[in-house]
Image: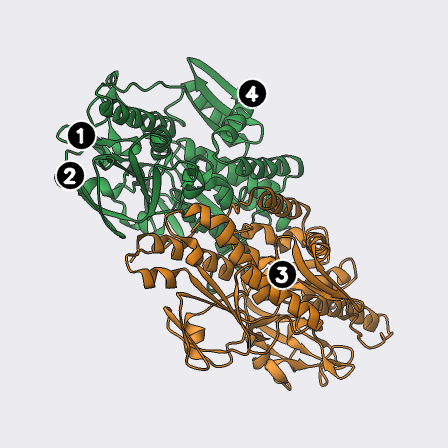
Chain colours: A green, B orange
């Protein structure tokens, strides 16, 4: 008798938890991802702001699965899924399944703004973070030899769109990079002229957190000299200028888009219903209505709880991944689980050195205690003991010496 | 009175030493490099073999020059030099000089083999190492899903050309990566079928060292199951096959070229004499015959000592860099230095775990003592205290756990 095969597509927070849950079972588990590593996305902004090397927030999937004999990995791109035939078309051939766990995550949502999509940098993949770090450092290098003062300043102007955790954390990390590190690297530049502009469409920051934490974050960022524009939207960009909804123009060579995500493109190819952001509505047990053998988890899944759609964040994906794994084991054992229920353990965002905000279990934390909690939790959730040490080392270094070591412009590059 | 300007082109081992020598003087020093970091090239092969992250062997030039008030840095490509006008054409405009120190280093020499140049990987720049690491890991991933056994094996076959230190060190590191790390990562593959073939044109390895060390290296590499071909030359390649001088064909998807270097292309653009490998003959004080204000150092310089041309290695470049700096200071003080004289402190190459060879002051060292000496010296010469810690951490990890953490396939990539 051949063992039943579970295929897990996507090795993000959800996929990894599903795999762990199925490790050691009598199911044949195949993991598929287009990268050979799991990415710890919450620290991506630190790679982009020259605080961490990219290797320290990525963990080899094969290193993870090595000790699990029933789990294999296949590096490939999933091009389509035939739900009726239970077959997956991958760049490395067809793969069939008995159970499917779909956690391909999300993609940046530019809301149809074509020129913005063309010129903006985003922060989804590891390569994005390296590209953005190179861009920031290269802009400063170009500014050194730029004779025109206006152009020099626009090279040192960075517009960050989106007042959620990613936008807030990146804007804070960027202004600290400029003020603590690059100010010393570029004494000839006058880096006090550099601008970090954070643009948010609503009237507050960190909408998922209590209002007073949003206010605290706003005041903190402004005191760090981030220019925060509320009730403002970016509508156009050309690589040298950013245009707002009211026609205002910010001369800036760098536009970073952290204003929204949508389900990964794979979701659109599935013959199933689609909800907001292209996400896939799932049953209370995370399976598809017509295909109980298919579970959709994480950012791709659309599920309401207490009349609110679950957010596209890592804790939801992790809990869904564990649930999907358990649901498969239960089904194989002839039992069923109670419906999936998300336990909100709170959320947090770091603003800068010694300062963060956190909301959990009805409590609000801000400043140094929140920052320490943020630091410990992120080290805890990082996979791989060595990665934890390297990340800690970088943080200690930065904290003591105000030094970010990874300010390298890497990869092939052409000069004007 | 304006201060005289020294321009140093190239921040390799020579350029960095020249800059340090001129730090704190009353000369205005401008450093030019096309990268914003100094690269510790001797460990490049460890980045390519997934042992070190690229950030740990690169050091920000601005971090280095920060504490030297008379030194500035300009990131740009040098396109040409007008020796008579004392002007440099860079991608960021024209720069004039009173003294010029030219240390643009070397480029890979494919000896006119066009198909080899097209298909081979080399190990000169940081990006090369990342590209080669990605290639190695991606070949193994492709082999997993490859149905044809012959093609599967050629995906797992790596031909390394050149029996000098780079070829020897990379071949040893690669076979250890395969046997210690990838064998566990790819249990489904049969990695004992993987091949590492080292091709050397002469009848011995490590020609710059005593013959008994070359013999020891040959035996060691063979005992580690590297296939060493002596008196053999690669003449053709097409990305799937490597052809030798006698018509023998090695089916291999990866060809690594470490068989020779020549002066960087910039040397050819100079209106001066050229010697073997495009190198520039210099006076005993490292200056150009017609231009005493121009010093050529490192791999670009052609200088005989005791009727032998000085080799293109880091210690020569370092000593030349220090000398050029001192020669300029002496000239400004109205004195002259005795001619440059290279002090050979020996050479070494690591073969694998616990084993290396070293020759210094007429003594030969091999095995564990040589390996320990190699390790300590490389840590010592690495710039940046944090880099030393990260590199040591990686080495300790590998030594204890047989784990190479950086086995990530990074950057944008397209699937077949």
- Using the image, determine if residue B1 lies above or below residue A330: below
Q: Do the residues labelled 3 and 4 touch (CB within 8 Å)?
A: no
| Spot occupied by residue A257 in the image (x, y as percentages of width and height) | 37, 42
> Mark 4 vs mark 1: which is more N-terminal?
1
| Spot occupied by residue A363 in the image (x, y as percentages of width and height) | 45, 13
Left or right of B91 on screen, residue B345: right
Q: Residue furthest right?
A: B335
The residue at which mark 4 appears reads as A369
Chain assignment, label 4 = A
- Residue B42 disc label: 3
* Element assignment for label 4: helix
Position of the N terminus of chain B by quadrant:
bottom right
Quarter of the image where one finds residue A375: top right
Closest to the observer: B172 or B115? B172
| Residue drawn at the location 52% of the way across and 37% of the way down | A173
Q: Do the residues labelled 1 and 3 touch (CB within 8 Å)?
A: no
């Amino acid at each position: 008798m051949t063992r039943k095969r579970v295929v897990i597509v996507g090795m993000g927070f959800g996929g990894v938890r599903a795999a762990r849950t199925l490790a050691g079972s009598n199911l044949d588990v195949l993991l598929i991802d287009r990268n050979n590593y799991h990415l710890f996305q919450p620290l991506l902004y630190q790679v982009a702001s020259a605080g961490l090397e990219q290797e320290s927030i990525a963990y080899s999937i094969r290193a993870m699965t090595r000790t699990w004999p029933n789990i294999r990995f296949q590096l490939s791109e999933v091009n389509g899924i035939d739900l009726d035939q239970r077959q997956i078309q991958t760049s490395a051939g067809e793969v069939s399944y008995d159970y499917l766990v779909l956690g391909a995550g999300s993609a940046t949502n530019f809301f149809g703004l074509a020129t913005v999509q063309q010129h903006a940098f985003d922060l989804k993949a590891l390569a994005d973070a390296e590209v953005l770090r190179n861009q920031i450092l290269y802009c400063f290098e170009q500014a050194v030899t730029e004779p025109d003062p206006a152009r020099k300043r626009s090279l040192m102007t960075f517009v960050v769109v989106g007042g959620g955790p990613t936008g807030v954390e990146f804007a804070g990390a960027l202004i600290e990079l400029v003020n603590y590190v690059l100010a010393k690297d570029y004494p000839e530049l006058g880096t006090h002229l550099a601008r970090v502009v954070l643009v948010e469409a609503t009237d507050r920051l960190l909408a998922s957190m209590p209002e007073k934490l949003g206010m605290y974050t706003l005041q903190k960022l402004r005191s760090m000299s981030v220019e925060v524009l509320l009730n403002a939207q970016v509508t156009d960009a050309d690589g040298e200028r950013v245009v707002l909804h009211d026609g205002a123009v910010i001369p800036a060579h760098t536009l970073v888009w952290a204003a929204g995500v949508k389900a990964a493109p794979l979701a659109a190819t599935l013959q199933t219903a689609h909800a907001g952001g292209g996400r896939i509505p799932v049953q209370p047990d995370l399976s598809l209505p017509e295909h109980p053998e298919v579970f959709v988890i994480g950012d791709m899944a659309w599920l309401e709880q207490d009349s609110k759609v679950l957010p596209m964040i890592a804790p939801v994906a992790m809990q869904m991944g564990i649930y999907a794994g358990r649901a498969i084991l239960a089904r194989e054992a002839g039992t069923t689980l109670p419906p999936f229920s998300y336990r909100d353990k709170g959320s947090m965002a770091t603003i800068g050195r010694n300062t963060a905000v956190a909301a959990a279990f009805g409590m609000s934390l801000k400043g140094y205690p929140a920052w320490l909690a943020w630091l410990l939790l992120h080290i805890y959730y990082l996979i791989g003991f060595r990665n934890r040490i390297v990340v800690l080392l970088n943080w200690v270094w930065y904290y003591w010496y105000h030094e970010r070591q990874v300010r390298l412009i890497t990869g092939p590059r052409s000069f004007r």
